Amino acid sequence: MNILEALKTPAFQLPDSYKNMTDSEMEQRVREIKEKFGDRLYIPGHHYQKDEVIQFADTTGDSLQLAQQSAANTKAEFIVFCGVHFMAETADILTQDHQKVILPDMRAGCSMADMADIHQTERAWSKLQLLFGDTILPLTYVNSTAAIKAFCGKNGGATVTSSNAMGMVEWAFTQKERILFLPDQHLGRNTAFDLGISLSDMAVWNPITDELEYEGDISNIKVILWKGHCSVHENFTIHNIEQVRVEYPDMNIIVHPECSREVVALSDYAGSTKYIIDTISKAETGTKWAIGTEMNLVKRIIAQHPDKEIISLNPHMCPCLTMNRIDLPHLLYSLETLEKGETINVISVEKDIAENAILALNRMLERAN
């Protein structure tokens, strides 16, 4: 279910009893249920989740890492995934048949993942094949639907993470002359640029108009970027950087590669969520940092490093709205439902989609090992 579908679905209302509970009461109930289920229950929490949820996570991390760790916990019958829909899909793909993956709020989606649906992608592929023939390899960011991962797997392509995107793009060019990079144009552009590919050799595929956006001889195109983006990271701007440079001239600026090319170019450091966390952790006491990534994580990093001066690159940035749909009441409701012997919001990927998606994931994992 994408965000548009979720918005058309009648809003689920939590029972009134949850509105009347205090945070302390809900926290105590979560602890009781976790203790009762023991190894049968596993709660992975994405870095961008609220602290009220993260406090109960058995593991925190990025989406693929959490899915892999869910799969490794074979004793867990129930994976209550505190993240968004595409992450829970990946967990379902990788876990075993006896494990159920549950998303506490089905309206927790990802606007970036929803910017490339399978129908748009298949139409684009047909048109691009007419333009370029069999010279294109599809790569998709793991921040994509299971259907898009399956499309890449079926067509010889692979998934990428923000940590390994450079290696995967290098590999892709050993397979084909061109790549189609879905669904985040910024990660694709930043990665290709860092590998020495000129911006003039990159085109953009617009899924709304079904057109290739490019000026010049299309035979020069090496990278076709899907016109998608992260609604959080795209809101970090050149103006934000200019303002920090004026107000805090000795401050380091570190951003996620989902930010625009212009923002990454003007920053001091750019890398995955793990890279950002590790860089700040290893930084010397007294250093100053402006971080360009999701606000829940930035606030958590600030709290964890009182010995450093840390701010958000954009002080007016809001947390990821869809990530924030997973809150303490929804987490508790999903757990109390399990306690009653019932399951809700089970994420289940169709077998044929899962099999092709695994092909794409395995091609990436083979390169990483």
Image (cartoon, rainbow, N blue to C red):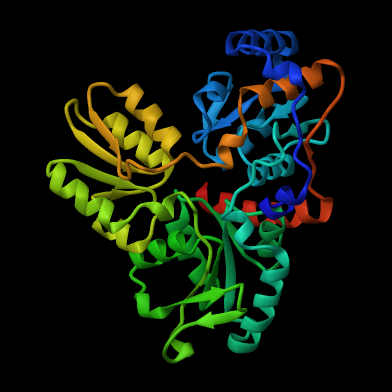
Q: Of all residues shown, which one is farthest toward the bottom?
A: 217
**Where in the figure is residue 134, as x and y percent of width and height?**
63, 82
Q: Residue reaching furthest right? A: 341
Which one is nearer the viewer's eye here, 15 or 198? 15
In this view, the residue in front, 181 or 334, is: 334
240 and 73: which one is in front?
240
The answer to whether residue 315 is left or right of residue 229 is: left
Residue 102 lies in quadrant: top right
Image location of residue 140, percent across then percent down: 58, 60
User: Residue drawn at (73%, 68%), measured in percent from left and top?
Assistant: 119
Q: Is residue 257 visible?
A: no
Asked if 319 appears above or below 211 in the picture, the reply is above
Foreground residue among 242 and 212: 242
Q: How many marks?
A: 0
| Residue 235 versus residue 152 in the image, above or below | above
Residue 281 in sight = yes
- The image quarter containing residue 281 is top left
Question: In the image, residue 257 lies at what x, y percent?
Answer: 40, 53
Say which residue appears at 51% left-offset and 42% top-offset.
320
Residue drawn where x is 68% and y is 19% of the image: 19
Residue 289 horizontal/vertical position (percent)? 24, 37
Horizontal side of residue 226 vs 122, given as left or right: left
Q: What residue is at 69 percent from the left and 80 percent from the top?
A: 126
Q: Is residue 127 above or below residue 359?
A: below
